[in-house]
Image: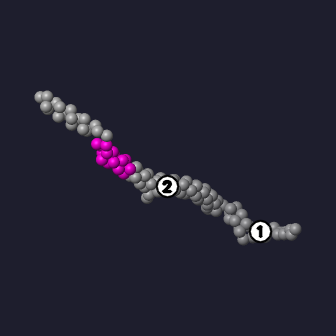
């Protein structure tokens, strides 16, 4: 028993000698460095890769631009729809359109042009 306990003690002391885990520390450093490189690559991919943060920000900007353009076109469509209704309902809109676009006047009117 005494011999076994002495051997176990010598082994435990041998494990705690300075420099005994030197290879283990190098492996740990290598593992840490690999983890850091992997984290940097992952961050780069998430930021600059396809579908990354930059792409998402650009898409959001494009969506806002498209929404503004859509609103402008919807307003123009409403104006044109109102003009169509006016043209279908009466002659006043047709007359106004002929005056503004074609420069037409009625037979009982006199056209006067003032040049400054």
Quarter that holds the C terminus: bottom right
- Numbered circles on residues, count: 2
User: Is residue 51 in view from this perspective?
Assistant: no
- As helix, strand or loop, the secondary structure at mark 1 comes to loop
> In the image, what residue occupies the spot 77% across and 68% down?
106
Question: What is the secondary structure assignment of the residue under circle 2?
Answer: helix
Q: Which residue occupies the foreground of this view, 41 or 97?
A: 41
Q: Nearer the viewer, residue 54 or 110?
A: 54
Q: Quadrant of the N terminus?
A: top left
Would residue 20 be found to the left or right of residue 32 on screen?
left
Does residue 23 belong to the magenta stretch? Answer: yes
Q: Residue at x 77, y 69 (%)?
A: 105
- Label 2 to label 1, Cα distance in Å? 62 Å
Tag 2: Cα neighbours inside 10 Å, few (<14), some, or many (≥20)?
some
Q: Which quadrant of the figure has residue 52?
A: bottom left
On residue 54, which mark appears? Answer: 2
- Region in magenta: 19-35
Residue 113, how many percent across, how many down?
Answer: 84, 69
Q: Residues within 10 Å of mark 1 (few under 14, many from 20)?
A: few
Q: Which residue is mark 1?
A: 106
Kindly give the residue lying farthest to the left in the view shown: 1
Q: Main secondary structure of the magenta part?
A: helix
Q: Earlier in the sequence, mark 2 or mark 1?
A: 2
Q: Residue at x 68, y 62 (%)?
A: 93
Task: Say if the magenta span includes residue 22.
Answer: yes
| Residue 79: x %, y % from top left | 63, 58
What residue is shown at x 60% (from left), y 57% (from top)? Answer: 72
């Amino acid at each position: 028993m005494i011999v076994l306990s002495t051997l176990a003690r010598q082994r435990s002391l041998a494990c705690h000698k300075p420099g005994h885990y030197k290879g283990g520390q190098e492996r740990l450093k290598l593992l840490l460095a690999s983890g850091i490189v992997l984290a940097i690559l992952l961050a780069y991919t998430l930021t600059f890769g396809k579908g990354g943060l930059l792409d998402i920000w650009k898409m959001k900007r494009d969506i806002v631009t498209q929404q503004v353009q859509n609103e402008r076109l919807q307003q123009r469509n409403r104006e044109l729809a109102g003009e169509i209704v006016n043209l279908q309902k009466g002659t006043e809109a047709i007359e106004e359109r002929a005056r503004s676009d074609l420069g037409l006047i009625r037979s009982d009117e006199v056209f006067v042009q003032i040049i400054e």
